[in-house]
Image: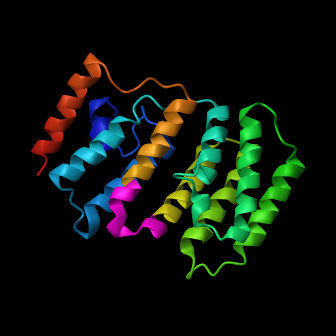
Amino acid sequence: MNVISYIYGDRVVTDYPACSARPLAAFVQSCNDLLAGPSGYLSPEDSLVALELGWQTVGTSGTEPSVIHAWVAELLTNPTWGVVQYAKLSSTKAIYDIAELHRLAARSQQPTQSDWENAYSAAVAESRSYDGAGHPAGTHALRSAYESTALADDHHQGTVDAVTGSALRAHAFATGSAASARFAAITHDAIASWRQLASVRSAGGASSTLTSDRAHELVSTTP
């Protein structure tokens, strides 16, 4: 992501470029770390995978709260990349209920505070039935769900970061370091979902091709 940050002229080069939504940048950075493995270095092939994922986050910053609600619902329950897949069957209802509240909020049908509080309490109660050490992916999946209820009151970046962080830990525990290709696919789906919900055009075109070529040059010359 720092390559994207450099190319797009951020005053301070960072893993969270101003042109990219922070949750998506976090997904890409986590994927980058898994691809790099214990050595901390990416192979040329994996560098291109990480760069392409980072490139797809360009233009996703500055979205409306409705998009965040809709995306969080997918983060929780999408059949392909949602964290609900890591929860015990008995716990899935708590996650689905919270996702439905986010979908209502995304449609400007704001649930009541009581709805959010009840959903939060149900998810927290379910999480207490878990052995965190024995079922870390499910534990973090539920944590992502109940943390997301705070979005009813605010859309502060810290809240979104916490929700995304818990979801990323759920995916990381479930896929493991040997399944970096699976994590890359999840990251791709998370980015594609955000772009679709926010109606962001595909990161393509003549000018972007030139910029992408410059990015590839930077990667290829990095020791």
Residue at image coords 63%, 67%: 87
- The answer to which quarter of the image holds residue 217 is top left
Tell me which residue sits at (17%, 56%) in the image.
43
**Which residue is depicted at the point 56% across and 82% down?**
134
- Image vertical order of residue 218 relative to residue 131, above or below: above
Q: Position of residue 119 (x, y in %)?
A: 80, 57
Task: Determine the main secondary structure of the stretch shown in magenta.
Answer: helix
The magenta stretch spans residue 182:
yes
Q: How is the image coloured?
A: rainbow
In the figure, is residue 136 to the left or right of 177? right
For the question of whether residue 86 can be seen, the reply is yes
Q: Is residue 24 visible?
A: no
| Nearer to the camera, 223 or 144 | 144
- The foreground one among 219 and 130 is 130
Q: Is residue 170 left or right of residue 118?
A: left
| Magenta-span inclusion, residue 174 | yes
User: Residue 150 appears at what percent x and percent y?
Assistant: 72, 50
Asked if 36 appears above or below 206 in the picture, the reply is below
Q: Residue furthest top?
A: 206
> Percent from the top left, x then y, of residue 85?
58, 62
Q: Quadrant of the N terminus?
A: top left
Percent of width and height locating residue 110: 82, 37
Residue at figure coordinates x 40%, y 57% from the top left = 183
**Number of numbered labels in the structure image:** 0
> In the rendered image of this protein, does residue 5 appear above or below residue 133?
above
Horizontal relation, residue 6 to residue 60: left or right: left
Query: In this picture, which residue range is highlighted in magenta?
Result: 172-183
